[in-house]
Structures are given as structure tokens and as C-alpha cells.
Amino acid sequence: MQLLLEKIQNDDDQQSFKQFYQLLFFRLYQFAYSYVHSKESAEEVVNDVFLCFWQKRKSLDAIDNINVYLYVAVKNASLNWLRKNRQAYTVPIEELKADHLRLVPNPELMLITHEFESHIREAIEQLPPRCKLIFKLIKEDGLSYKQVASILDVSVKTVDTQLYLALKKLSMILKPLMPVNSSVCLSSSNEE
């Protein structure tokens, strides 16, 4: 990703920008959707953020963490969109929904049967909204606890607690589906 950013900043490389956009769009779209609850509006918000990103490409080296920067930009753009559309209220994090969740494929998950994957998705959908959003940002989008805390404007301890609760609930829901000899091993590392 660093190479793409360098090409975008130094060479005005539109192909690198397109790759960068494709790499991050879906995650940022899901995040925007959790605020605006509209597919078209979420897409508009994310595209506006990427347009601004392209326009400010010459100053990318001033950004410490591009992931956190983009998530915060999408959050702020989503809240601005809500204000402009006469829904001028702050959405409490408890009311946010992380719809359109998907499990990111990796070799380990590819071994899981389609049926078990459906059970996992159903279990994730049963999580409380805050737990589901934090679970998605950490486990699916790969953000750190500190990044999620910064994005959602909560403490790292809150993120840790919510992820712990999410994993505990998922473990309880999925335990009956596991063979007698195995146990569901969902871990929460205390990352900061």
C-alpha cells in the first residue's frame, strides 16, 4: 500500500489511485453505511472522501496513519451528510449498524463449510450494534484497537471490552455447533 501512496503523491499516478480505491472502498462503504443507512448515500460519501483524498494527494506524507485518516474522514463526511439532509442529530454508537458484513476469505476460512459460515454470519448478526461494529472493524477490516478507538472516539478499554463481549457471545452461540472434542477458539488479544 505504501508504494501505491508514493506513486499517487509523487507521480500523480491514476492507476495506483484506482488500485488504492478498490483496495479500501468496500470497507469504507460499509462504515459509511453504518451511519447513513442508505447504499447510494454511503457510496456518495466514500466517493467524496476519495475525491478530496486525490485533490490533496501532494500532502499525503503529512498523514501518520492513512487507514485511520480515511475512516475518520468517512465518519465526518457521514455526519455532515446527515446534517445536510435534515437529520441533524448525532447517532449514538449503540444505534450504529454494521450491515453488509462479510467474512474476509483466507485459507483458514476456506476450510469452513458453507453451512458453518452461515451460522457464523447469523451469530454476528445477533451481536449488539456496538459489539458488531467494533468486531467488524477489528476482525474484518484489520484495524487495531487504538485505531478503532480513535475512529469511534471511545477509549481503547471500551474497544477491548466490546470485542471481548462480542467474542464471548459468538463463542456461546457457536459452541453447540462444534464437535465434542473441539472448542471454539475466538481470541481477543489486548492490543493497544
Image: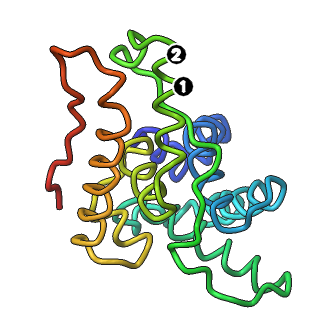
The C terminus lies in which quarter of the figure? Answer: bottom left
Amino acid carrying label 1: it is Ser
Callouts 2 and 1 close, C-beta under 8 Å: yes
The percent coordinates of residue 130 (x first, y second) are 46, 65
Residue closer to the observer: 149 or 46: 149
Residue located 45% across and 46% down the image: 6
Residue located 71% across and 81% down the image: 80
Residue closer to the observer: 142 or 185: 185
> For numbered disc 1, what is the local secondary structure?
helix
Which disc, if any, is residue 133? Answer: none
In this picture, residue 130 sits left or right of residue 184: right
Q: Is the residue 104 above or below the residue 67 in the image?
A: above
Residue located 82% across and 84% down the image: 84
Residue 89 found in image quarter: bottom right
In this picture, residue 22 sits left or right of residue 129: right
**Mark 2 — residue?**
115
Residue located 40% across and 20% down the image: 106
In this picture, residue 34 sits left or right of residue 137: right
The N terminus lies in which quarter of the figure? Answer: top left
Amino acid carrying label 2: it is Glu
Residue 95 found in image quarter: bottom right
> For numbered disc 2, what is the local secondary structure?
helix
Judging from the image, the colouring scheme is rainbow
Q: How many labels does the image show?
A: 2
